[in-house]
Image: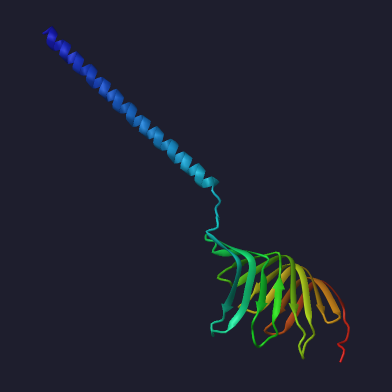
Amino acid sequence: MSGRRGERSAQRVRLLIIVVVLTALALGSFWFLQVMHRSIDDSLSNRPRNKPDYFVEKFNYVKMALNGQPRYDISGAKMVHFPITDSFEVELPVITTLDPANPPMTLRSQRAVIEDDNSKIHMYGDVNANRAATAKSENLHLKSEYLLLLPDDDVIKTDKPVEITMGTSVMTGTGMIANNATKELQLLNNVRGLYQPRTR
């Protein structure tokens, strides 16, 4: 009898040890998964949310209109693509309009952001726009710290101070809307100007 009791006690002890070991393994696995999950969450939260996926240096491309005619040409020192917003950031952009119905205009700045399927181009820092003189219009030069180009609408906007030189006439103001399609130019605030008649 005592032998059987001893065997049963030994079996209970073995069973208890196995249960304790399995419980410890289960708790250890649960703890390990929690630690791993937390570290993954931390690493994801520390990762840049809009990391670029590719870049191009010394690039040049032409944007075409729906009718197959070239609309404008963009070149720059470097272009970086951000996949989350599907936008581009451009260093030292040069944008030249190519509409045969209008005289070409060239715009330059320190950087630009292109978004909404190339329908919006934000130009930042020392923005300069130049349009050469034609038989019907004088040369035009525009300066600002920011311009928004809407190439599909042929419109240029800014809410910053702007200086426009046309021939020998100079206008300044804060805020501007220029519609190249309708040949309309609006200066919105603090407008000042010096007009010199065009020489014949």
In which quadrant is the C terminus drawn?
Answer: bottom right
Q: Residue at x 50, y 47 (%)?
A: 44
From the top left corner, tell me how far across and down residue 63 is, in percent: 58, 77
The outermost residue toward the front is: 58
From the top left corner, tell me how far across and down residue 12 is, in percent: 21, 18
From the top left corner, tell me how far across and down residue 182 is, in percent: 69, 85
Looking at the rendered structure, the number of numbered marks drawn on it comes to 0
- Choose top left, top right, bottom left or bottom right for residue 72: bottom right
Closer-to-camera residue (98/171) = 98
- Choose top left, top right, bottom left or bottom right for residue 15: top left
The outermost residue toward the left is: 1
Q: Relative to residue 45, is residue 195 depicted above or below? A: below
Q: Residue at x 54, y 82 (%)?
A: 66
The outermost residue toward the top is: 2
Q: Residue at x 72, y 84 (%)?
A: 183
Closer-to-camera residue (78/182) = 78
From the top left corner, tell me how far across and down residue 135 is, in percent: 77, 91
Q: Residue at x 19, y 18 (%)?
A: 11
In which quadrant is the N terminus drawn?
Answer: top left
Q: How is the image coloured?
A: rainbow
Q: Relative to residue 125, is residue 40 depicted above or below? A: above
